[in-house]
Image: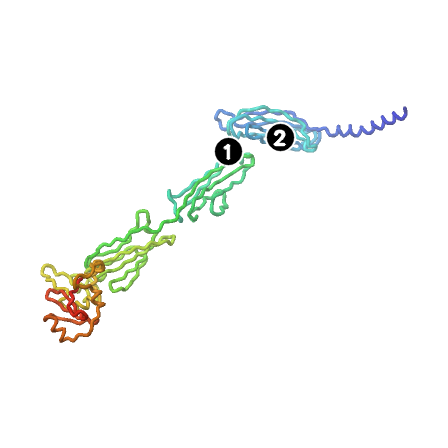
Amino acid sequence: MMRNSALVLVSILLLLPLSALSVSAESTIGLEERRVDSMDMNNDGFPDMLSTIFAVNATEDSQVGVQVIVETDRLVIPFWQNMTLSAGEMKFGSIDIHAWEDGDYHLRMLIWDHGLEIITHEVDLGTFDLSTALSPPTLNLELQAAEEIFTGDNCQILRSFSDDVGEQYNAIGVVSLTGVPWQVLNETAPIDCSAWPAGAYSVSMQYTNGLGFGASTTVDVMIANHPAPDFNVLVNGQNERMGTGCSVVAVSAENQTDSDLVFSWSITNPKLVETTESGVKDLDCGLWEPGVHKVRVTATNPQMQTTTLGVNVVRLPPFDPADPSLGNISDDSSWPSSSSGEDYEATPLFLNLQASAAAIGGGGILFGLVFGVFVGLMLTRGSSGSSRRLEDVLEAAAPPVNEEEIGNLADGLPTYTDPQGITWRQHEDGSMDWWDAAEGIWVKFES
């Protein structure tokens, strides 16, 4: 009997501390008042904000946390307000919820004792229908460039960003950018795409804030290699006389800007002397000497691409070589003869036998201008009968023949032996033939 009593006493003594601990663990925080007010912040007739108002007290010094949990079909977001209460103190507070989307908002309030880390009160505040008060995150990329973009052209991409929800709840996220050829540091400054290499780019911008709201946008940029310079060469004064108006002009194509091109010229005159010009788009050929001038012009664009075109400019002898407006003229003896109008009487080309043979053998300017027109035909025509071409004449072997023997064979016509040793005979009409010593015959020269 005594033993059982002792066991009961020991059990009671062991339970006393637990009972005291249970009592000491009870929170001294109380929720005195709570309510929810719907508000129309933009005055459109529809509520778009909820204000939760509450009052809490404590019988002892306490650390209190008021939590309002808001649930929509898409999100669950907790809102907090923490406060410190002295023993016997009561405090009021409020938590505002701005609508981030249209729909139903369900609210619950929890009161936390941070000292004990327990929930002292949990209250269902109800469900409310709200319209949007805050704009969701928006992103935009706007390409500013020509419809067709080439390397080096002006090009930029404007960026814009907004997030009312993230700003309201201090939950701004980070904007990320992809699809650019190199890193862009600033999040809002325009993106310069003027120096991008040729290619197809899909530039994307993505964003997510701390509440889970996100947005994305994309813009496509196509940059082509800049085309080579496109231009034409026009000649004003072709086949006109020296001293008359003449110009060689580089004319850019319609899709090409003159200021973008740099022109350089190479001019080879009839004496095969080459001169150059640069930085100009036209040449004055009014005083170019008679003959054929080979003109080459190269255009270079800012991307250092080049295009080269060429043209032959033919200028005829002046009416009066002594005209002082022609400037200093030399060696005009090699120019072709000029017509003197109705009083001019044509002189057979080969009347001066020595000059004629020299022109044929040396390829003078006169011969080049007159005879050059027929070169293509000469190269394709074969010989007929005893007639031979100039090449045949120059290649023919010419054994020595004494002048007396030639004179007897020339039928009284004038003869001339050129530096190559070929003997020529000229008829009254200006036609010529040459002595083929190997065959022992006169061969008519055909042009």
Q: Amino acid at mark 1?
A: Pro
Can residue 323 be seen from the camera position used here? no
State the CA–CA distance, disc 2 to disc 1.
24 Å
Point out residue 80 in the picture as x, y percentages from the top left corner. 61, 32
Which residue matches tag 2?
Answer: 67
To which quarter of the image does residue 413 belong? bottom left
In this rendering, is residue 250 above or below 123? below
Q: Which numbered disc covers residue 316?
A: none
The reply, left or right, for residue 189 in relation to residue 433 is right
Image quadrant in which the C terminus is located: bottom left
Residue matched to label 1: 136
Left or right, residue 64 beside residue 169: right
Contact check, label 2 and label 1, Cβ < 8 Å: no
Indicate the quadrant where residue 376 lies: bottom left
Q: Residue at x 60, y 24 (%)?
A: 125
In the figure, 289 relative to 11: above or below? below
- Secondary structure at badge 1 equals loop
Q: Residue at x 25, y 62 (%)?
A: 269
Q: Circle 2: is it few (<14), some (14-19), or many (20+) Cα within 10 Å?
A: some
Question: From where the camera sits, is residue 106 visible?
Answer: yes
Category of crowding for the residue at label 1, using alpha-carbon neighbours closer than 10 angstroms: few (below 14), some (14–19), many (at least 20): some
Image quadrant where residue 311 sits: bottom left
Q: Earlier in the sequence, mark 2 or mark 1?
A: 2
Q: Is residue 200 above or below residue 57?
A: below
